Amino acid sequence: MNRQDPETPFTSLRITDMSDDDRPREKAMKHGIGSLSDAELLAIIFGGGLPGMSVVDMSRKILADCDNRLSLLARLTIDEMCKKYKGVGPAKAISLAAAFELGARCRRDMKNAEAVIRSSKDVYELMRGHMELLDYEEFWILILTRGNTVKYRRCISQGGTSATVVDVKLLLKRAIDCVASAIILVHNHPSGAVRPSADDDHLTKRIKDGAQLLDIRVLDHVIIGRDRFYSYNDEGRL
């Protein structure tokens, strides 16, 4: 076995050891994260390479082993990554798994956020999974584009079992910050009943009047209960 010269030890080539032109972080700062190759993105996650091999080259080798398909790499478990690739320990494998998981969650979030609202039932189906089984009230707004695509979902307040306090100024500020063309109000009734209270009616009017001054349309206020919902718009009350 060839032994390492003690006076010239092998070192793991890290991103900081590379020239400025080859450093993925500097390239990302200068040209944007989208300018990086898959190997360079992996290199940023891994941070360090192998003795005598840069982290970018190590990343290229790992990708080549996966037929240069990120989808195949993403399917490997943390334990498989550690066993299969020299230089990839638990810390690197967990960091990579976290990056893939964030990407997957981002895709799911974008899918939800890009829902198009055509009716009150669309609102109900979008929000029921989160709200109908809560044992306390939450009040949300959906921020819509001019084409009625959901751009953002924002929780405005959480309350008790029978009410939640909504700051109308804060709600409208959130809408303005998100450059809303239109909004939909959504809250739940933990009791399961969906008939609006007098307080619900008063709050809806205050929000609608305030939004009108800001040229923001309030398209609906949907109350979610157990397996049912109430729509102010459907009832001709907006």
Image: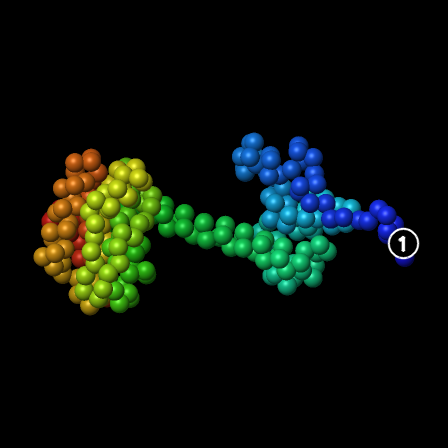
Question: What residue occupies the far right of the structure in this picture?
Answer: 1
Q: Helix, strand, or loop for circle 1?
A: loop
- What residue sits right under mark 1 in the picture? 2
In the rendered image of this protein, does residue 219 appear above or below residue 190? above
Residue 133 x/y as whole percent: 28, 66
Question: What residue occupies the far front of the structure in this picture?
Answer: 7
Residue 231 x/y as whole percent: 18, 54
Please indicate, yes or no, whether residue 57 appears anywhere in the rendered image: no
Residue at the image position 12 percent from the left and 59 percent from the top: 197
In which quadrant of the rendered view does residue 82 lie?
bottom right
Residue 199 x/y as whole percent: 12, 56
Residue 43 x/y as whole percent: 64, 45
**Amino acid identity at mark 1:** Asn
In which quadrant of the rendered view does residue 28 lie?
top right
Left or right, 231 with respect to 9, comes to left
* Total marks in image: 1
Foreground residue, 3 or 219?
A: 3
Quadrant showing the N terminus: bottom right
> What's the image's color scheme?
rainbow
Left or right, 169 with respect to 42, comes to left
Residue at the image position 29 percent from the left and 61 percent from the top: 131
Left or right, 200 with respect to 115, comes to left
Residue at the image position 12 percent from the left and 47 percent from the top: 205
In the rendered image of this protein, does residue 70 appear above or below residue 227? above
Residue at the image position 32 percent from the left and 49 percent from the top: 153
